Image (tube, helix red, strand yellow):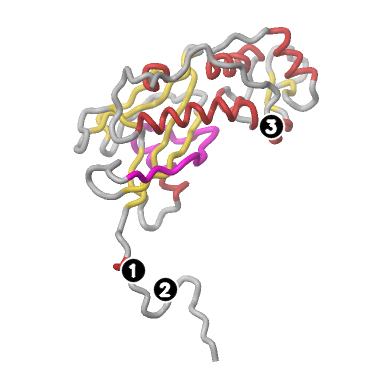
Amino acid sequence: MLTKTPRNQAPSGYDASAFPAFAVAVDVVILTLSDGVPHVLLVRRGEAPFEGMWAIPGGFKRPTETLDVAAQRELAEETGVREATLLTQFRAYGDPGRDPRLNAVTVAYLAVVPDVGALEAGTDAAAAALIPVSDVVNGKVELSFDHLQIVRDAVERVRLELEVTGIAPAFVGRTFTLGELRGVYEAVWDTRLDDDAFRTSIVAANGWVLPAEAGSAELYRAGPAWEHGGPIRRVPPTWEVKA
């Protein structure tokens, strides 16, 4: 009679030591708009390796955690940010040597926060600060590990997501003006959009925005259409990431 091995139990004779061990980490690229300019939240490392250098928040996943729980914990512990309107995985990185301590694979998350509030560096972070995205992706700010590549990939992901998903409202509050929403596209794509054309694209179509309250002609809230895509097609940016 064939005996089935329980799903949560290794098969008899299975030798896990035959495979090289590696650690799993999470890293979070936190993007926000400050004075209409895209910024990324960085922490200054308080310990080796790369002590004193800037990095994106992150750390090793604990054995009892899911990846999402680990990302939320690192976000709160290292920056003081306890809630993001968007927190989602976008890529994994596992190149040999990316971490000088051990073989480590990191799962990168993209977080969008309308307002980061008061920053509170914690655990192994010595400081936390908002840095303009353009300064980071163009190499003006040196990052530890492979975090420059991760930030660059996150920025390109957001530029694409603005076209195909409902990511734009995540950058603004629950209520917003059309000017604030247009500013998200202009900042991320680094371009200018015609005010009247934008208003027509957003308001004329059903479901993109709804009045925030009765009688309000200025404030809106996101409608259900964002669950199925985005209303604006991407305009080529006027600046590109330098190699």
Q: Earlier in the sequence, mark 2 or mark 1?
A: 2
Q: Amino acid at mark 3?
A: Gly
In this view, 168 is above or below 62? above
- Identify the residue at image location x=51%, y=13%: 36
Amino acid type at circle 1 is: Ala
Q: Which is closer to the viewer, label 1 or label 3?
A: 1
Q: Give the spatial CA distance, label 2 vs label 1.
A: 9 Å
Residue 72: x %, y % from top left? 44, 42
**Which image quadrant is residue 226 in?**
top right
- Label 3 sits on residue: 229
Which residue type carries mark 2?
A: Ala
| Residue identified by numbered label 1 | 16
Residue sitting at x 40%, y 80%: 12
Q: Secondary structure at mark 3?
A: loop
Name the spot of residue 187 as percent of width and height, x first.
Answer: 53, 15
Task: Decide which of 13, 170 is in the foreground and name it.
Answer: 13
Going by the image, does 62 lie left or right of 189?
left
Residue 10, numbered circle: 2
The region drawn magenta spans 71-95
**In the picture, which quadrant includes the N terminus?**
bottom right
Mark 2 in CB contact with mark 1 (< 8 angstroms)? yes
